[in-house]
Each structure stands twice: as C-alpha cells, then as structure tokens.
Image (cartoon, rainbow, N blue to C red):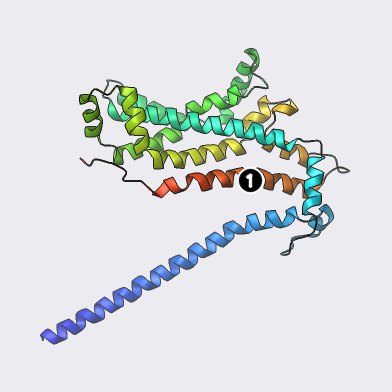
Amino acid sequence: MARRKVHLYDETEIKENMSLTGRRTIAHIVLIFLTLLCLFWFYMLFINCTRSNSEIMKGFSWLPGKNFFENWKNLKNSTVDVFTGLKNSAIVSIISAALCVYFSTLTAFAIHAYNFPAKNAVYTFILMIMMIPTQVTSLGFVKFCRDVGLENSFLPIVLPSIAAPVTFFYLKQYMDSSLSLSLIEAARIDGSSEFRTFNSIVLPLMKPAIAVQAIFTFVSSWNNYYVPALLLQKDEKKTLPLLIAQLRSSDWQKFDMGQVYMCIAFSIFPVVIVYLLLSKFIVAGVQLGGVKE
C-alpha cells in the first residue's frame, strides 16, 4: 500500500509539473506576441523614415528605402526648427517630471507620516481631483494665463505638474507598503529635521517608485499637445508635438510624409534614452533599507 501511495503521489506531481509547464509556455507565447505587436509600430515608423513621400503613399513595405538622409536634410531645411522644438520639449518635460515627483512624494509623505484632523478629507479631495479632465478647466485656465501675461511662456505648462493626483496616489500606495513609520520616528529621535528626513531617508527609499513616475511624467509632458497648443503661439516656443502637427498641416504642395515620419522618429529618441537611464531603478532596490513593522 505504501508503494502504491508513493506511485500515486509521483503521478500527481508529474501532472502538476506538466500543467505548470504548459501554462508557462502559453504565457511566454502571449508575451512574445504582444512584444512583437508593440515593436511592429516602431519598425513601421523607422522603415517609413527611409522612404520618400511617393513610396509611402503606395503603401507599407517591409524593406527600408534609400531616402533616410534626404528626409533628414529636408526636415532640417523645412519651415520648422526641430532642434528648437527638441530644446523646448526637453525643458518642459525635465522640469515637469522633477517638480511632479518631488512634490507628489512630499504630499504623500505628509499624508502618510502625520495625523491631523482633516487627513482623510484631504486625501479624498485629492483623489476627487483625478476625476476632473483637463478639458473641463482649460477655458478658464487659458483665460487666466492671458490675463496675467503668461501666454507664450513655459510656466503655465510646467507649474501645474506640481499638483499631480495620479502620481500622488501611486506614491502614497507605495509608501503604505514599503515605508515604515518606525524609521521616521527613529530619525526624529536622532534629531533629524522633517525636511532632512524626507530628503535623506524617504527619497532614497522611494527611488524605484519615483523612477517609474518620472518616466510616466516625462513621456506625458513630452507628448503633450493640448495645453501647449492653447498657450504657445510663437515658433521659438513651440514643442515637438506642435511642430509635427505643423508639418502635417502644410499645404499639399509642401506636404511630405517622409519629413513627418522623420520628425516623429526624432522626437522618440529622447524618450527611449530616458527610459533606458531610469528603467534599472524600477525593479532594483524595491526593498532598499526598508524596516518592516
């Protein structure tokens, strides 16, 4: 009887291992398919960068063309200044990402580490702001910016990133799971001020979450078209999304899809570089120095 039970247990274990292997194989196949599907659009973009306008109009091709340098030359000699647009987009995106992650982390720290009477009400109010779309308040916001003379300025595009409810919510959830209050109390007992505790202890522990939100905020600001289109009218202030739209709205005699694809590809490179620089912090250091309750 004992030998039969052992034999049955072995068969059950083999079946479980086979089932687990099958699920893993299916999961890998699905992930590979989704990866190829995502990369296909980048492949199509860079293929079209190398083709002329007439070739693009004929349809998609799997093979690159021979007009890469000609498209780049035409883009540099076009009516839009892509390098100025790159500089403007970089200024807006970097400052927005820095302000967003710092002040959102600071707000999340205040809600997480302090007890005050209106704590739950403040937390609920911040979450309610997430439900208000930008388009609802854009008319009054643009009118206010024009009244105070902030039209054609980066300030009204950058400063609202300080109040980012979505980023705050993510960082608050991360603090609840990884930032121990005993660590903060220990710093206070050692005589550390609140801002020193935040800058020297909390920010390093929050590095993975901050890196994730910095990537998201940077990409969102880099691709932002709606608000800059309402406020930036001067060519020397326009960001890359506005310049791409300007290229696409050219009259039919000057319209060149090769230039448009080249400009789009030119605008994607900085986003890829930022992701490669910050992605190592997403997984690494999740348990960095955390003290568990």
39 versus 169 height, above or below: below
Q: Quadrant of residue 242?
A: top right
Which of the 4 quarters of the picture holds residue 210? top left
Q: Position of residue 217 (x, y in %)?
A: 52, 37
Residue at the far right: name it.
253
Task: Report x, y in % for residue 121.
Answer: 34, 24
Q: Residue at x 32, y 32 (%)?
A: 201
Q: Is residue 120 left or right of residue 126?
A: left
Residue sitting at 78 percent across and 43 percent down?
A: 75
The answer to whether one can see residue 124 in this image is no
Residue 26 falls in image quadrant: bottom left
Q: Which residue is mark 1?
A: 268
Percent position (x, y) of residue 248? 77, 42
Q: Is 213 placed left or right of 241 in the picture?
A: left
| Figure check: 197 above or below 5 | above
State the quadrant of the N terminus.
Answer: bottom left
| Residue displayed at 73% across by 38% down | 82
Tag 1 secondary structure: helix
- Relative depth, front residue between 127 and 178: 178
Q: Residues within 10 Å of mark 1 (few under 14, many from 20)?
A: some
Q: Residue furthest left?
A: 1
Q: State whether residue 52 is above or below residue 86.
A: below
For this view, does 42 lie left or right of residue 94?
right
- Residue at (48% x, 26% y) in the render: 162
Percent position of residue 290, x then y: 27, 41
Q: Amino acid at mark 1?
A: Ile
Q: Please tell me whether residue 103 is drawn above or below residue 48 in the rendered image.
A: above
